[in-house]
Amino acid sequence: MVYAQPGTKGAIASFDARYDNFIGGEWVAPAGGEYFDNITPVTGKVFTKVARSQAVDIEKALDAAHAAAPAWGRTSTTARARVLEQIADRMEANLEKIALLEAWENGKAIRETLAADIPLAIDHFRYFAAAIRTQEGTSSQIDNETVAYHFHEPLGVVGQIIPWNFPILMAVWKLAPALAAGNCVILKPAEQTPVSILEVVKLIADLLPPGVLNVVNGFGVEAGKPLASSPRIAKIAFTGETTTGRLIMQYASGNIIPVTLELGGKSPNVFFADVMEQDDDFFDKALEGFAMFALNQGEVCTCPSRALIAESIYDEFIEKAIDRVSKIKVGNPLDPSVMMGAQASNDQLEKIMSYLDIGKAEGADLLIGGDRRIEKGFEDGYYVQPTVFRGKNDMRIFQEEIFGPVLAVTTFSDEQDALDIANQTLYGLGAGVWTRDQGTAYRMGRGIQAGRVWTNCYHLYPAHAAFGGYKQSGIGRENHKMMLDHYQQTKNMLVSYDPKPMGFF
Amino acid sequence: MAGPLSRVGHRLLLQEEALVERVDITPEAVVFLDRLRLRHGPLMFHQSGGCCDGSSPMCFPAGEFLTGPSDVLLGSVSGCEFWMSASQFAYWSHTHLTVDVVPGRGSGFSVEAPEGVRFLIRSRLFTDEEAELLDPVTPG
């Protein structure tokens, strides 16, 4: 069954005609009264309008958050955890609707939002509900009369700037730990995907005290910058690209506040010769792992966009791998049998096309795809063919995050060569290793300079597995209880139980 | 809005002694740049890398983005300095870049996004002749 487009006959969900900001528990019009068009990449058409906020709207949200912060920070972890559990329950009861709206706004296949984005987001709230309840401070006996107590305290009011590739899931990755830890949040969604998270907020608004969660939409330069540079936030979290990441660090340095950054990668996916020793389920899984570059249309920070294949198996392996890629079903994201939908925006489509050009110009061999795809009935949508190039690791298509369904393939001679190529990148977010040999898997897993090495799997994102980057891929770890540390102060109370003076004065 | 990629070649024919510039800009992008300057004053570019809107040239008020020893200045386009991180330049140095503009909705703090457009980089390889006459980059 193909889902009906939101707002049309038979649709399970619809969008509003216009969206305001969510500030202090209320829907508040932007001070300037302006709204910007929101386009669905599925058809390339405008489907709603969204608040175009300015610094004054950010200030309003900061006022609401600061008003709410003392009480929320003192709310017991039991009560805060209960709120997160209720949010999860509410989202679960509306999973299919949220999945539809997310697919329509972002262009991704509903097959993915139903099975991954939204279930993972729901589980994330439950995970951090558990994590905050089980978190403990410490007490240390320094000597017989002196004890050091360590308490976790919320930072206060934090800013979070969310990317457009997983608009709801990435928001929840940041929101769940921040709220669990007792912070109030100003969330600035990406301007390409400003609305689906607001549909989630509509569902859960009554569960949170006013001002604990505030969502302000607008353009980066007009709304994101006043948030990131505000002296009234205690921390800023950002997922995106390196130049904005640096600028956010620069603003944070002015206020001497911490940042967490997730800035992408150019993740290697390494296939050793022994994957082909048998034609079994494992080899089939490895071929699926090769095709994972097309997940979410390649718009994933950890997209396995470089495949490194043992040269001894290259010809046989690539034939089967390209056959697997040829079976990727591209098209209407609302058809649950479709595996790959539309790129998120026109400029994203243009950028991918520019990389297909440079790949060809640099002399990479085009193995499959290589062009835009015109979908019947969706002629103005932003579709690209899954594309595989063969080339060398110093080519630009091997070094830059295209953020599209474009894979760059090369070969390696031995394990050391594989490790060298894998690490020849500015980034270090994800990596994949495929082998039947545990020793190879262990050495590669430890040797690759990346925060996450998927071993005989790829693109799994369970809560409780830390996610974050080495090198230029960023700072901090998400998706794990250690994320709480990024949203908490450590209070040390150093207590003397000795009644006698020290004797210095 | 494809760029006039023959422009560097044309310049080479006219002035054989001139160094080959690394960055160029399309007339369409100049129009937007001029419009943005009226509102924001002098501007600069810093070429981004990484995810989401990575690989986009980010346009800021001049001096807004602090460049330093980890950056290189590739040149200027229409009066705007064009910067890139030195580590990224190591992989880009063999390509000529043209700043173009396309309809779009970019993230980041780039100043053109509210106009409903996005600056975009188009690239081509330098020819062997050009490669010998390349304008050296300036460390930040």
Image (spheres, rainbow, N blue to C red):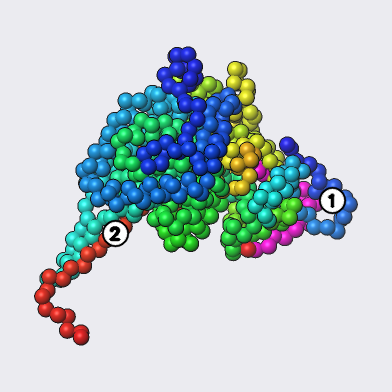
Q: Is residue A330 visible?
A: yes
Q: Position of residue A212 (x, y in %)?
A: 34, 44
Quarter the N terminus of chain A occupies:
top left
Residue A54, numbered label: none
Image point (21%, 43%), residue name: A78
Rendered residue at 63%/22% (across/down): A379
Give the side of residue B123 with respect to residue A38, left or right: right
Q: Quadrant of the C terminus of chain A?
A: bottom left
Residue B11's disc is 1
Task: Specify few, some or many for label 1: CA neighbours under 10 Å numbering under 14, 14-19, or 20 or more.
Answer: some
Q: CA distance from mark 2 to mark 1?
A: 62 Å
Quarter location, residue A197: top left
Q: Chain of mark 1?
A: B
Q: Name the residue furthest right.
A: B14
Q: Is residue B132 magenta?
A: yes
Q: Is residue A136 left or right of residue A15?
A: left
Identify the amino acid type marked 2. Answer: Thr
